[in-house]
Amino acid sequence: MPDQFYYAIEVTLNGLMAGVLYALVALGFVLIYKASGIFNYAQGVMALFAAMTLVGIMDGQVPFAHLINAMLGTHVQHFGWHVPALAAIVLTVGVMVALAWMVQRFVMRHLVNQDMIILFMATIGLAYFLEGLSDLMWGSEIKKLDIGLPQGGSFWIEDMTSSLGSDGFYGFFIDQLDIVAAVVAVLLVIGLMIFSNYTKEGRALRAVADDHQAALSVGISLNFIWVLVWSIAGFVALVAGIMWGTKSGVQFSLSLIALKALPVLMLGGFTSIPGAIVGGLIIGVGEKLFEFALGPMLGGATENWFAYVLALLFLVFRPQGLFGEKIIERV
Amino acid sequence: MKDMDEGYITEDGRKIGGVVMEMKNITLRFGGVVAIKDISFDIREGEVRAIIGPNGAGKSSMLNVISGFYVPQEGEVWFHGAARPKMRPYEVAQQGIARTFQNIALFEGMSVLDNVMTGRLTQMKAGLFSQAIWKGKAEAEETANREIAEKIIDFLEIQAIRKTPVGRLPYGLKKRVELARALAAEPKLLLLDEPMAGMNVEEKEDMSRFILDVNDEFGTTIALIEHDMGVVMDLSDRVVVMDYGKKIGDGTPDEVRNNQDVIDAYLGVAHD
């Protein structure tokens, strides 16, 4: 076998891993969309906010330090302690639940029975608000996130595969973090599927997405379900934030990964959890292979646009995505 | 007269019990519009109680007050002998008051069976974890709930469409599925908002039969709104007549039929 072939496999594997990370973000979108019919523009910023909060808590940063110092003339920055990763994650989950409650209390609750476009606009506002809030709370400098996840190439895989090609081939390079992310994503999806299909809360959630009035009439509390949905979305955002934050540092650009999730959603369909995963994988593999095969000819950097072009094609030929519910309008 | 507290036996042998729900001097306003003006009436256990009236009389508003979707400015709703505090619709549902809607509110994306199962949500108590791993309490509970749901599906003769997504069903069947979902909650009081609106004669007959059977078989107390006078007179034990937000008649179908105010409201009266 020529080395070129093995390189292609390596690229594919790495594409799959990148795809898992895209899928993680897309998952958050799908969840809220399925449960409340809202396209949550703020999902990416929620990932940023979650990651910022996690780092802040772990480092013992004083929240709103700049604000406090400016107003009271003090110089507090740090509490001077460090919180272990696991405890910090639990605390961050708590913060995300509190955030979910606030979103419900101050935004969603006032928009019951409004048009989708209005709810969508509300999430745009939420995105900018959260962006500002995370800056104000934790500062805007780039931070390093390390909760002890393995990082760097897996030597084991390299050693095992180095004998495949010729002397110039050193085996497959696969980031351990990507493997962890893949495993976490699989667990998350299984958990969410069980939750939405087999539990009473899951059933109530689907009911609310379908019809507010009917849901009320069978005894479902809309407020509770909304807090639940936004909490879960917050949790998924935290997971995505941890993975991306560990990979490329916690910084503002983290919120832009949301943009990468859009083509994933168009491919997979906005309403399908498996669709988000498969869509993510297709885009991950597609853009890496495309870059590998045609990138040099096209001047490189095809990864920046490949996903969007693919999504555009899907919009033209199959607007509901691969797994989405077919859009039928009765007349 | 039928005002004895302990109830009575109807001509066809059904037992009507004491008062389960009582509306006391209900007034409901939307801004300057008075939708319901100082109305009082009661609903007895096991009876079929109809609310009729011309368009815009305030019938649906009345039903919405009972089911907690509207909160009246004045008056009290008594349920099982106690004044009901201000409640949200889902809390009212949890108290055992189920309802259907005039323009059908079903979960269109779900199958018929899933829709009916949502009616059982208030009865499910098992913890999240137990439900997720499908063991212990949750398993027994789901089985029991499923049995009740299936029984109701059989009863309303919609077995053939159990797995069909509701969105694909024709109007008449949707109405029936909505009734099934309301029944699944095993309600103490069932509210039907125009259960026969927009149906053809055959569908109306089916629906009337189901309503009577439900009342007969499960002893469910039913309050319904209907336009079709013929149907109302056949179905109900007692009738409240509303017009322009006021109560103009209350009694058995025969009493109401001969009430001059009611005749005027329905047939019109010369204003001279």
Image (tube, coloured by chain):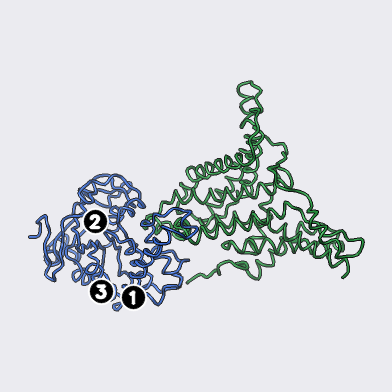
Chain colours: A green, B blue
Question: Residue B101 at what x, y percent from top left?
Answer: 34, 62
- Residue pointed to by mark 3: B209
Classify mark 1: residues with Cα within 10 Å, few (<14), some (14-19) or many (20+): some
Question: Residue B184 at what x, y percent from top left?
Answer: 34, 64
- Residue pointed to by mark 1: B157
Q: Quadrant of residue A62?
A: top right
Q: Are marks 2 and 1 in contact (CB under 8 Å)?
A: no
Residue pictured at 26% horizontal, 63% vertical:
B225
Residue pictured at 65% horizontal, 57% vertical:
A23
Residue pictured at 79% horizontal, 52% vertical:
A153
Q: Is residue A278 left or right of residue A6?
A: left
Q: Is residue A246 left or right of residue B45?
A: right
Mark 2 vs mark 1: which is more N-terminal? 1
Mark 2 vs mark 3: which is more N-terminal? 3
Chain letter for mark 2, please: B
Q: Amino acid at mark 3?
A: Arg
- Residue pointed to by mark 2: B244
Cα gap from disc 3 to disc 1, whole angstroms: 12 Å
Question: Residue A154 at what x, y percent from top left?
Answer: 78, 54
